[in-house]
Each structure stands twice: as structure tokens, then as C-alpha cells.
Amino acid sequence: MLQVSGTQLVTDGDMPVRLRGVGLGGWLNMENFITGYPANESSMRYAVRGVLGEERAELFFERLTTSFFTERDAELLAGMGMNCVRIPVNYRHWEADDRPFEIDRHGFRHLDRVIGLLGEHGIYSVIDLHALPGSQNQHWHSDNPTHVAAFWQHRHFQDRAVHLWENIADHYRDHPWVAGYNPVNEPGDLTGKVIGPFYDRLVKAVRAADPRHILFLDGNTYSTDFSIFREVYENTVFVMHDYALAGFAHGGPYPGHTRGEWCDRDELERTFAKRSRFQRETGTPLWVGEFGPVYTGDPAVDAQRLQILRDQLAIYDEQDAGWSLWTYKDVGLQGLVHASGPYLQRFGAFIAKKRRLGADRWGSTMEEAADVLAPLHALIETEFPAWEPYPWGARYQSDDLVRHILIAQALLPEYAELFRGLGDDELRALADSFLLERCVRREPLLDLLADNLKR
């Protein structure tokens, strides 16, 4: 079982371990750009159930969850030299909103299966609660149908999160291949006043249930602000996220300018130094919980994106920082591998429509449908020049509200209708499109990572 020792993680035998691997996004916490649906997960599931009915929707989602990660996936990652998978999960696998505090033990079945598969191949798991009751941040990846992080406004949601973590920690307290717990992914406490006391409370509760596993704690404002920590907890990694501006969907050339900001290797290094200042000052391990560029399909642009990744990995190697690349598997934007076959045949045109409308926050260039939205942005800039909403300002907020909530939710019925009339075997075939043996491999990315992991 791993422990924190100064700036390193070590085994029981005092051997240092630098955790390097991927995030298993889109699996137990589904995301729109990863599996091709619009809006947020719970809204999507509701729409699909409306078309398929409860039993047949369960058949599809259960098969998808089984096919998305199998022993062959664990073999691939182990063969590349990875020793860690960060596993995002949604609280809804264990608890329903209409039955709070009632933990469904059945929710552990797939997590147990994959943690077991990874352990058999010498790979540690970090359990990451990516979606908390009430939503801990303002975006789709916390299964948030709005732009309000209500988790920080209601003690009820916080009580439920603590209770869930007590159960998760008790369940895995003796598991040697669980590296630890990442209890709150990318928190977005608008005030910055609730999160510190909440972490104090959560740490005590988890430690009471499981005193040995490492805690991986994200800073506020999407794992960038560590001033909220009132003490340095024992056996804890303070997790930073380190996305490069030029690596976003709206990123410019690399090296070059993106929306007026210069980005090159030196700037990547300066940004990493800034984001990791708290860890250096406190003498705690460096671990990047998320990072990684998105890809466009343009060979010249994608070569630049791979260079961003190559430069970031070199910086992490120089600093002895561990990392978890986002993300392993999807429908083509960012994954090491991506689905093909029946799923893309069925949903490919719909995914293209989402792309045309910029409906997915993570895949949007912020320029789609510019003829329609540009006047709105100009109006807001003119009429409300001082408006700077949390966390990233007026332009991002406007796009979130219009593109990624309004347009995305308007797309939900269209996505769900694509399931209508499908037989059980066809539903299974859709889900099985995510089996590794049926996926397309992004070979340049796989080669780059395998080469780095050999060092």
C-alpha cells in the first residue's frame, strides 16, 4: 500500500513510486465529448430512458460500462509502462437524489472489477469522485445541468458526500492496489470560504474509515488555487491540473499566441512552476491529476499538439512529477483510442452537428455559429464591460449558457431518438463499439507515451 514520504510516494518497503498513467474518463462518469451525447449525463440518461424504457436503457448502459474497459485495456496500459489509472466516478452509482444517504452496494460492482483487473497488471487506481451531489463545479463534467455549483450552498449535499466517502473508504480500506482517494474533482467554490472547512471535515471522516490510504486533494477553482488549505494533512497529495492554453480546442499555433497569450515550452514551464508552488513550499509530492491537448484531425495542428504533450512530459520528468493524462478512450477528440463501428455509424452525423454548433464545452473553438452569437458577445461587452463572472469571465460564461447548456439541452431529444427502433442485439453492438479490439488507436500518441514511460 502506497504512502506519502516527503516529496515522494513509497511502497511499504520504502521503494519510491512515481504514478504515471491515464484518466478513465467517460466510464463511471460519462461526459458528452467522450461518448458523443449532448449536455450532462443524468439528463442524457433520462432522455434515453424515455425512448428505450427502463429495462432496455439499463441493458445498453450496463453493456457499455462492461465493454468500455476490459482486461485487454489493462494489458495495453501495462504494456506501455503505465502504473496508474485515475478513475472518475459519479455519485449516482451509489445514491439516488430521491433516496439520500441510502447507499446501493451494487454500485461497487464495476469499480471492483476494473480495480481488480488493473491490480492484476500491476497498476494502481486513484478513485476520483468527479460528480458530487449538487455539483461541486459549474460545468457538465460534474453532471451539472446548470451553471451553479449548488454543492457549496447546501450543507445537505456536503453531508451526503461525506457519507458516501465513508462508505467508499470502508469498502477499499484494505485494497493494496488502490493508491488512494481523490474526493472532489475540480471544485469550484465561488466564495472560497466553504471548501476549506469542508476539506477539514472530509479528511477526518475518511481517515476514520480508512487511516492508511493516500488522499489526493484538488485545489479550488478547478484544481488551481491551493490557498484554501488551512493545514497540510498527513499522507496527502495536493493535486494540480495543468492544461496548456494552446492545447484547447480553441488553441492557436504552438509556439504562438492563443487569444493574445503566448505559449511555448518556457511558458509551459513557468505555468507549471506557478501551479505547483504550494506543493514545493509544503514539501509534498508533485502530481498532475489532469492535463493533455485535444486533437483536430489536421496533421499539422496535431503535430503541434503532440509537441505540447512532449514538452509537458519532459518538464514533469525533470521535476520528478507524477501524472495522469486525460483521457484514455472516447469518440475521437482526445483519447489514446477511440470507438468506431456501429456507434459512429449511428451517431457520427449527430456528433458532427454538435461540433458544428460548438455544443460541447471541451470540443468548442468558441467560434462556431459566429454569425449568430457574435452580436450577443458584442452586446454583453458593450453593455456590461465590468461583468467578470466566476470562474473565467464573460466570454466563457456566455458560451456556457448559450452553447453548452441551452443548445446542448435542445439537442437531447435528437440524440435519444437515434435509439428508437433498435433491437437488443443492435444496442449491444453500439455498446461493443467501445471494446478495445474494435477501437482505432491514435498511434502517434501511443508511441509518444510508451517512449516516455520507458525512461
Image (cartoon, rainbow, N blue to C red):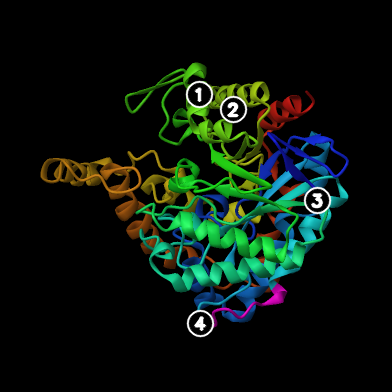
SS type, badge 2: helix
Q: Distance between the residues labelled 3 and 4?
A: 34 Å
Q: How far apart are marks 4 and 2 (CA)?
A: 43 Å
Q: What residue type is labelled 2?
A: Leu
Q: What residue type is labelled 4?
A: Asp
* Sequence-wise first label, 1 or 2: 1
Visible in this render: residue 39?
A: yes
Is residue 103 magenta-colored?
Answer: yes
| Magenta stretch, main secondary structure class | loop
Q: Distance between the residues labelled 3 and 1?
A: 32 Å
Q: Name the residue under label 3.
A: 118
Q: Where 13 falls versus 116 (above or below)?
A: above
Left or right: 367 in relation to 332: left
Q: Mark 2 points at which residue?
A: 309
Is residue 426 magenta-colored?
Answer: no
Q: What residue type is labelled 1?
A: Leu
Nearest the viewer among 208 and 215 is: 208
Q: Mark 4 points at which residue?
A: 98
Visible in this render: residue 428?
A: no
Q: Which residue is drawn at 82% across and 57% down?
A: 116
Q: Where 388 falls versus 305 (above or below)?
A: below
* Sequence-wise first label, 1 or 4: 4
Q: Distance between the residues labelled 2 and 3?
A: 25 Å
Nearest the viewer among 272 and 68 is: 272
